[in-house]
Amino acid sequence: MVRYAYYPGCSLEKNAAAYDESFRRVAEVLGIELVEIPDWNCCGATEYFSLDLLPAYALVARNLALVPEDLDEVVAPCSACYYNMYKTDKNMAAYPKLAEAVNEALAVGKLHYDPGRVLSRHALDVILEDFSLEEIGTHVKKPLRGLRLAAYYGCVTVRPAGHDDPEYPVRMERLLETLGATVVEYTLRANCCGGHMTQLDADTAYEMIYYLLYNAAKLGVDALVTACPMCQLNLDAYQGQVNSHFGTDFHIPILYFTQMMGLAFGIDPEALGFGQEIVSATQVLEKFRNPPEEERKPRRKRRDKDALPMPEPLSGGG
């Protein structure tokens, strides 16, 4: 059993509860013990860092200071949470005056954080770096044959660099292949989903989301698979508004990679949070349970040198 401190973050308690539920179930299968940080608080998302840096760093450092002393790694499924914790630790180490100011703020709550004590990691990194694809494959009971899936990382999951190609990552594709799915090459995999632009400039946000959905639809995917709650929220919750805005009829479920792992591991879909999505994944589950006859046989693995499709140009309508 491998133990990690666990930081769920605000999204995984509400709109991304399916991510939390599926990650916990997959972790059990892999032999991961998640020790939730006691009394954790919001990481501040992106807004705090654009308003006042010291309170923003102090807010994040408080969570790092609360990591149990016997643990030195914390895993966060949310890309923004992971990035904020990683950035806070690195910047406190690089700028002693910042660390001093942050710890002065933490001292009010009788806390202290020494930069470098805790390594912040994304859930995707933990699963794909601490476990080989071969190990993961041994847990596959119900391969995802018949499902055409495209991986969508978004722009934050691939940062910081060092884990994969930040512009054209491939790890989630390899994972989906291991799970038995037909992986569709999605060239927009690291494009931004618009983040909180939906609250600031809806027209611009809808255009960004439209571009992502349009190209996914052209590829005939059954679902987009992501590792970021913000990406999932924007493409799922605003898909209806995008359809109304552009006169399109997209119906593309946006699911978490942990949900797909759970399905392949034989875990009940309800326990993985299926049904919580806004764009229903019912057809995905039906196809998973009843794959086309030709998909029930093992397929040849995709070659790295296979040609990659280029994204369609953005137009004003569907």
Image (cartoon, rainbow, N blue to C red):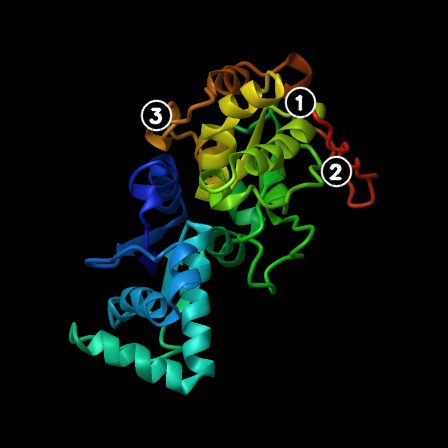
Name the image quarter holding the N terminus: bottom left
Q: Earlier in the sequence, mark 2 or mark 3?
A: 3
| Residue 169 % position (x, y) | 65, 51
Give the labeled residue for mark 2. 302
Q: Which of 147 and 93 lies nearest the eye of the viewer?
A: 93
| Mark 2 or 3, closer to the camera | 3
Distance of label 2 from label 3 (alpha carbons): 31 Å
Q: Earlier in the sequence, mark 3 or mark 1?
A: 3
Label pair 2/3, CB-CB below 8 angstroms: no
Give the labeled residue for mark 1. 297
Q: Residue at x 46, y 17 (%)?
A: 282
| Residue 53 % position (x, y) | 39, 69
| Residue 39 % position (x, y) | 19, 58
Q: What amino acid is at disc 2?
A: Arg
- Characterize the local packing of mark 2: few (<14), some (14-19) or many (20 or more) Cα atoms within 10 angstroms: few
Q: Which of 113 and 121 lies nearest the eye of the viewer?
A: 113
